[in-house]
Image (spheres, helix red, strand yellow):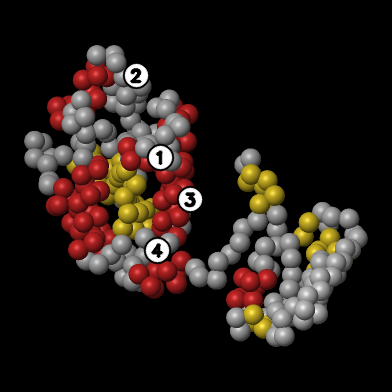
């Protein structure tokens, strides 16, 4: 492995870029031959440009984080992640804490799970509206909506369901990192898939909400007519009919159906708001 080190005669009259000294620059390590190339470009002002020279010398330290972000010092290791090879994580000079301070809230994921027809999307919308009225920024990742775009290439087979949830979990993680309260309303029938999404986030930033409405009530509601189609055999692998739903074992909140009485979406949203306030997610 060799380190590419810049040999750069001044192109501009100043050695400062946006207030940052640019005399110390480091690059990513690449497996290149220990050889050097140079080329000079001459213009009216006799500016000169030399390409990189490969050396075995260690890179010089960067003066500060801003210079590191510009120079690429944080790009110090090429990695392989799954099928993605030769990738490098680039650290942003603005972090999650900075964004949370700007928004005056803490980013997290509210993961609402339950059977089709349990009211997940309705509760998600009520919660989003309640947060908006309090001046808090939230975004809903609805299971059906995501399948209109990002996940439109996935079916409802078990392996595609798992990939569907994995993608939603990764997107939700990005929203939380941005300081946004992300509300994911998805059936997410398999416990291991929900647990995998939880593992993506720091402890406490994944709030699993089980909308515990019995199958017979969901089927009686049947707002999309899907239970009727499943019972008729026109939809295969429908959760609760011929595909299992695994209820959470240790969710943060459970919103149960109490007999024939069901709290209104706004009441359930206020329950979730109280939880967020208690856990101090509605302040930076």
Q: Which residue is mark 1?
A: 149
Cβ–Cβ under 8 Å for marks 4 and 1: no
* Image position of 90 (left or right of 218): right
How many other residues sit within 10 Å of disc 4, few (<14), some (14-19) or many (≥20)?
Answer: many
Q: In the picture shown, does residue 63 fall above or below 119?
A: below
* Image position of 20 (left or right of 118): right
N-terminal of the two: label 3 or label 1?
A: 1
N-terminal of the two: label 3 or label 4?
A: 4
Location of the C terminus by quadrant is: bottom left
Question: Mark 3 to mark 4: distance in Å?
Answer: 15 Å
Location of the N terminus by quadrant is: bottom right
N-terminal of the two: label 3 or label 2?
A: 3
Q: Residue at x 72, y 81 (%)?
A: 12
Q: Which residue is mark 2?
A: 236
Residue 245, position as x, y percentages in the image? 33, 30
* 23 and 221: which is toward the camera: 23
Question: Mark 3 to mark 2: distance in Å?
Answer: 31 Å
Q: In the picture shown, does residue 142 fall above or below 46?
A: above
Disc number at residue 179? 4
């Amino acid at each position: 492995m060799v380190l590419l080190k810049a040999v750069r005669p001044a192109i501009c009259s100043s050695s400062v870029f946006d207030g940052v000294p640019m005399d110390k620059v480091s690059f990513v390590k690449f497996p290149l031959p220990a050889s050097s190339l140079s080329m000079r470009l001459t213009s009216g002002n006799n500016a000169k440009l030399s390409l990189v020279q490969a050396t075995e010398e260690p890179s010089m330290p960067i003066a500060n984080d801003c210079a590191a972000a510009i120079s690429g010092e944080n790009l110090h290791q090429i990695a392989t992640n799954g099928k993605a090879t030769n990738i490098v994580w680039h650290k942003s000079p603005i972090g999650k804490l900075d964004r949370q301070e700007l928004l005056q809230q803490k980013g997290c994921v509210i993961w609402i799970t339950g059977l089709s027809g349990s009211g997940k999307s309705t509760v998600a919308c009520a919660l989003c509206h309640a947060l908006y009225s309090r001046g808090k920024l939230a975004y809903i990742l609805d299971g059906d909506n995501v399948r209109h775009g990002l996940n439109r290439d996935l079916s409802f087979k078990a392996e595609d369901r798992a990939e569907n949830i994995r993608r939603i979990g990764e997107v939700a993680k990005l929203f939380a990192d941005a300081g946004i309260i992300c509300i994911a309303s998805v059936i997410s029938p398999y416990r291991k898939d929900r647990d995998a999404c939880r593992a993506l986030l720091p402890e406490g930033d994944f709030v699993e909400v089980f909308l515990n409405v019995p199958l017979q009530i969901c089927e009686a509601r049947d707002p999309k007519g899907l239970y009727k189609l499943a019972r008729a055999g026109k939809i295969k692998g429908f959760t609760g009919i011929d595909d299992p739903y695994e209820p959470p074992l240790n969710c943060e909140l459970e919103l149960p159906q109490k007999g024939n009485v069901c709290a209104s979406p706004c009441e359930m949203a206020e329950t979730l708001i109280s939880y967020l306030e208690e856990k101090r997610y509605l302040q930076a």
